[in-house]
Image: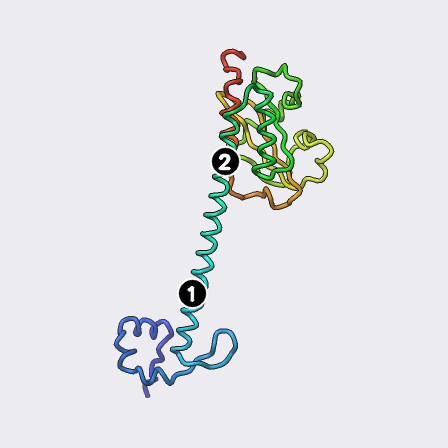
Amino acid sequence: MTKEKVMQPNEVLQYLQDNPQFFENYADTLANIYIPHPHNGKVIPISERQIVTLREKNQTLQKKLLELISFGEENDAIGEKMHHFTVALLTFNGLDELLRRINLNLCDDFAVPHTAIRLWNITGNELDSQEFTETSDDIHAIADSLSQPYCGPHIADEIKQWFGADADHLQSFAMIPLRATQTIGLLALGTQEPQRFYPGMGTLHLKRLGELVSTALSRYSIEQNDSD
């Protein structure tokens, strides 16, 4: 006796895909077939199961749409802050005022509670300002090595000391290199929020922020030929 071949699930699926008229020819039979509900364990008609599937897909699409809207609104808000920051940088008179505006606007517009800047290769280091405090060669090397802003919970002890008495309470940091014709400094941001600056986060806005600050400072940068 020849054993009847049993169709495998993939073969059944392929048959149905190749013969869509099957559903029309056997519509009444299919209406009487019941299968388990995906969530509560009850049995329901195939047609109702299809409705459940479509409802779940619709909910997934709605969730993705809401996420896109949220991202768009967030980007619009950041774009507005960037514009305000740019305008502020265009209205300064002198390096001392520029540095004050940078720190003030980062705090007010971007809600960054702790900022620190260290500069070198800048004319105007005669200013009695902490931004021109001497930094080690290691800090210069860190700034030179950053092709993108750094975000994470760890920074060099020397940089952490820039935040003074607040340093021990900060849990996440961003480091943004400042460059003109050469590296001219490092902008460090700190916060008590562990997830404000985290590894792997997008750094496009931080990079643009660094470019704005660097451009504003570039008029004070020392050309490489002059510093040799």
Q: Which residue is mark 2?
A: 82
- The kind of secondary structure element at disc 2 is helix
Name the colouring of the figure. rainbow
Kind of residue at badge 1: Lys
> Which residue is rendered at x = 64% and y = 40% of the image?
191
Image: 28 above or below 151: below
**Residue 203, percent from left and from top:** 51, 39
> Which residue is rendered at x = 36% and y = 71% of the image?
10
Nearest the eye: 221 or 150: 221
Q: Mark 2 packing: few (<14 Cα in 10 Å), some, or many (20+)?
A: some
Q: How many marks?
A: 2
Kind of residue at badge 2: Met
Q: Which residue is mark 1?
A: 57
Q: Earlier in the sequence, mark 2 or mark 1?
A: 1
**Residue 109, percent from left and from top:** 56, 37
Q: Are marks 2 and 1 in contact (CB under 8 Å)?
A: no
> Which residue is rendered at x = 38% and y = 74% of the image?
9
Quadrant containing the N terminus is: bottom left
**Mark nearer the viewer, 2 or 1:** 2
- Answer with the quarter of the image where residue 26 lies: bottom left
- The kind of secondary structure element at disc 1 is helix
Left/right placement of residue 104 relative to residue 43 reads right
**Residue 91, percent from left and from top:** 52, 25
